[in-house]
Image (tube, helix red, strand yellow):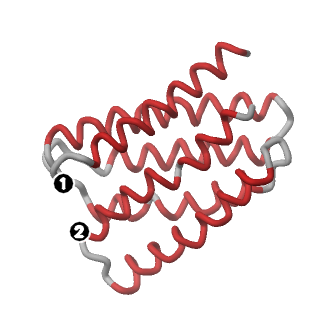
Amino acid sequence: MQLLVLIIIIGYLINFILGFVGACFETNSYLQILLWQIGDTGGITASILASRYVGAKGFHLSAASFNMLGIVYGISFGSFSFTQLNADKMATLLIPMIPAALLVSLCKLFPFWTRMLAVLNLHTIFYYVCKYYFWNLSIYELDKLYKFFRNSIIGFNLVLLYL
């Protein structure tokens, strides 16, 4: 099990580091997209393995939330081509992010402060979902939203450090 936890932490760290490094490059540049896709791959892997780990401890709702988070990373990965971001696909990743964050917040396996961080992120995520779907969020704002999404995942990453 310790190897599993180590792989989970490495996957989320890859996602976290490459997300911030990619954000430093020009929007929609080949290098930015490549770094984000590699980071998303780390996030997908870590999320699915975290689901297995948390589920084995008997926390099945939280295990489902990590599966949903893996889906979120998959949507993120699929929203890129080699030359651009597909804004419509990217916006859809926020919808499964809401129940994923909520289900993680219900699990007493995690420290209280990380569960509350997940709930606080729900407000910001919901705001951007509404803004995109109802108030025509621009592609430039969506790029900022993606960078925020990377930051909002910190709560999920920190949760795993306490397993």
Image location of residue 46, percent across then percent down: 55, 31
142 left or right of 58? Answer: left
- At a point 48% along the width and 62% down the height, the residue shown is 94
Q: Relative to 152, is 65 on the left or the right? A: right
Q: Are marks 1 and 2 in contact (CB under 8 Å)?
A: yes
In x, y percent, where is residue 126? 54, 73
Q: Which mark is residue 102?
A: none
Q: Residues within 10 Å of mark 2 (few under 14, many from 20)?
A: few
| Between 72 and 28, the one nearer to me in the picture | 28
Q: Which mark is residue 27?
A: 1
Left or right of 47? Residue 92 is left
Disc nearer the start of the sequence (1/2): 1
Residue 32 percent across, percent down from the top left: 22, 43
Q: What amino acid is found at the position of numbered circle 1 in the picture?
A: Thr
Rounded to the nearest angstrom, the CA distance separating label 1 from label 2 is: 9 Å
- Residue 85 vs 32, above or below: the answer is below
Estimate the x, y position of residue 100 in percent, counting from the top left.
63, 54
Eyeballing the image, is 38 above or below 116?
above
Q: Quadrant of the C terminus?
A: top right
Element on which disc 1 rests: loop
Taking the image as shown, residue 74 lies to the left or right of residue 55, namely left
User: Dividing the image into 4 quarters, which one contains the N terminus?
Assistant: top right
Residues packed near mark 1 inside 10 Å, few (<14), some (14 to 19) or many (20 plus)? some
Q: Residue at x 74, y 46 (%)?
A: 62
* Residue type beneath disc 2: Tyr
Q: For mark 2, what is the residue?
A: 140
How many labels were placed on the picture? 2
